[in-house]
Amino acid sequence: MARWLALLGLLLFLPLSVGADERVTDQAEWTIRRLITNNVEWTRVSFRESKEEFLSFSEARVVGEGMASDRDGWDAMPFRFSVKVHRKDLRTRDARVEFADGRVLTSRDDWEEPVRPEADRIRFISPRWLETIYSRDITFRGASTGRNDVTVHVYDRRGREVAKRSVRPDGRGNWSVRIRLNEGTYRAVATTSRWSHGEEVRFAVGRVSGDWGGSGGWGGWGGSGGSGGFGGSGGSGGSGGFGGSGGSGGWGGSGGSTQYRVSIDRPRNGETIRDGNMQASGSATSREVDVRVYRGSKIAHRSKQRVNGGRWSARASLVPGNYTIVVEAVGGRGSRESRFFVR
């Protein structure tokens, strides 16, 4: 008995992996949204990615990337953020936002009352941020915390609304709508009653050179840029900066973009994995690929994988659920995705 008690005591001190709590992530994003809109000129805040990190059984840290913009403008200001959230009562502290232009916002370091949601929380599941889609028929998928109709507005590079569709979420809050678009670069905004609380995604249709509208010279998103950006390597810009000129598809970057071929052999679209061990593989003409696995709108796994002999592979342990794997070429354009199940 003493040996088992000692083993139990040891296990209590081992680092554990805790699944992401939607309430924690939602509260983190509401807190960051309020911090930004109360202190700078931007009126709408969207989140590209949010990830929950385990601190203790009572506290989590949520980190991620986002974009602040005006309602009608194409220009945007990328940012990265972190905030601590109390798991039980959703109080927050130590919020920090770093903008691409160097501005920094911080909150108090003691616990603050949670932000009350002022509208339904909407998320895009697809298209992904900065994704290139080689089909004119675009299926927009997402999730909402409410049952109000979701309206998807699609704008072209000149700010003209080229499409608008409304849809009622199902009993689980999931929604989808299909819109036919011409070749070009677009931004889509999903809203309910409060425009400022809508969610945005930017994507390209066909073989176009993406101008994603980033301000502040941040080359990190989706392409190359200086050290300290969100994205890959290369590009100009000083160490610790947010990127510079050149690069492929980066925020604010200029210059050309190399088109790479990317394929996913496993998991196949619609495949069911029985043991929870995903072993992904495929081919690519780039030197490296970015592998992301989503469960709903949350990232369950992300890794950079070298391409050897035209082949790439990645592994991850996953809990039961429905997943999407997205594989993108690093240093250029080209991506593929596949949906699969873990049972």
Image: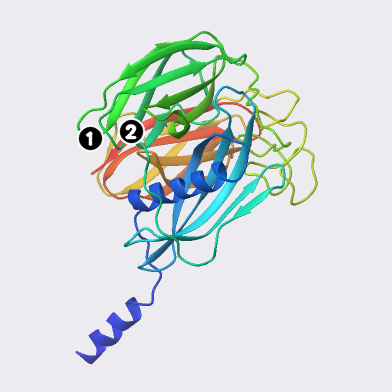
- Is 288 displayed left or right of 136 in the figure? right
Is there a contact, CB below 8 Å, between mark 2 and mark 1? Answer: yes
Q: Which residue is mark 1?
A: 172
Q: Residue at x 37, y 28 (%)?
A: 193
Q: Which label is found at residue 143?
A: 2
Q: Residue at x 51, y 12 (%)?
A: 161
Q: Amino acid at mark 1?
A: Arg
- Is 26 displayed left or right of 217 in the figure? left
Other residues around mark 2 within 10 Å, as few (<14) / some (14–19) / many (≥20)? many
Tally the numbered discs: 2
Q: Amino acid at mark 2?
A: Ala
Quarter occupied by the C terminus: top left
Secondary structure beneath label 2: strand
Other residues around mark 1 within 10 Å, as few (<14) / some (14–19) / many (≥20)? few
Q: Residue at x 39, y 34 (%)?
A: 123
Q: Residue at x 50, y 46 (%)?
A: 34
Which x, y percent locates residue 247? 72, 31
Going from the N terminus, do you reach mark 2 or mark 1 first?
2
Most foreground residue, 305 or 324: 324
1 over 25 or under it: above or below: below
Between the C-alphas of marks 2 and 1, the distance is: 8 Å
Most foreground residue, 312 or 70: 70
Residue 263 appears in view:
no
- Is 59 displayed left or right of 209 in the figure? left
